[in-house]
Image: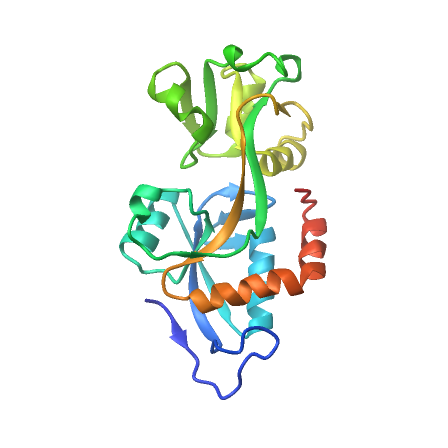
Amino acid sequence: MQRNCLISAVFVTLLSPCVWAGNFTVGVENTDYMPISKAEGGNYSGYARDVLDAFAAKAGHKFTYKPLPVKRLLDEFAVEKSLDFKFPDNAYWAADVKKGLNIRYSKGVVAVTEGLLVLPANKGKGAGSITKIATVRGFTPFPYLDQIKANKIGLSEVNTAEAALTMGETGRVEGVYLGTLAANYTMVETLKKPGVLVFDPGLPNSTNDFSLSTISQPDVIKQLDEFLVKEKDTVAKLKAKYKIVE
């Protein structure tokens, strides 16, 4: 484990007083999923980092972020157990790999709605109009898995949200499976084409919490939960900074 708890005589009094200040390694996804997070050149940034850093500063911890490919991140966290925390995580993700593990999940750091974005002219045409979709490599379009496995829907995986959205814009796929926050951010900030695709709420979609998870540090998760409740104003300011509306 890459954790070195600091033996200090001072407890953190503003949050749960049972946890010593410590240095912890947080495994994160090596992807561009702004405004939530972005890992580039070993650096980690975005809303999620700002929230976790604000919590760490309040609790007296230090977080070191380790960007990894999605599959490798899961392996290091759940199989090798070489990470103190994983972000993002959710109890429903990779349940087969996590089976038998006592994993503690925080309250949602952010709630993300994921579904299909389509050309504005195709919104409302229904699921029967979808034969091919694109998503970012490492992400799973859960509402469409059965149809993908049955070869009723084709799936293209690309490296970036920008590439996936471009496939939708040019008609190479009928839908792009992404989180709406990341999709809208990419269309506005990267492609400079706001609204070139739109979320279709009439198609299968899901809303999930992006949480911090741990196997070895449940007390820190408890602290984070308290922080998210007690520091609502701080969290709200960070959401406003990144234009996050859940």
On screen, 48 above or below 116?
below
Point 49% across, 49% down: residue: 39
Residue closer to the observer: 104 or 79 = 104
Residue that lies at the very extreme toward the bottom in this rendered image: 9
Which colouring convention does the figure follow? rainbow
Q: Left or right? Give the position of 4 relative to 170.
A: left
Point 44% across, 24% down: residue: 144
Q: Quadrant of residue 226?
A: bottom right
Q: Quadrant of residue 213?
A: bottom left
Quick one: quadrant of the N terminus? bottom left
Residue 167 visible: no
Instruction: State the image coordinates of residue 169 (x, y, percent, origin top left).
Output: 58, 19
On screen, 26 above or below 70?
below
Q: Left or right? Give the position of 186 relative to 213.
A: right
Point 56% across, 56% down: residue: 49
Residue closer to the observer: 189 or 216 = 216
Residue closer to the observer: 167 or 76 = 76
Q: Left or right? Give the position of 93 relative to 128.
A: left
Quick one: quadrant of the C terminus? top right
Instruction: State the image coordinates of residue 142 (x, y, percent, origin top left).
Output: 43, 31
Point 47% across, 43% down: residue: 31
On screen, 16 above or below 113?
below
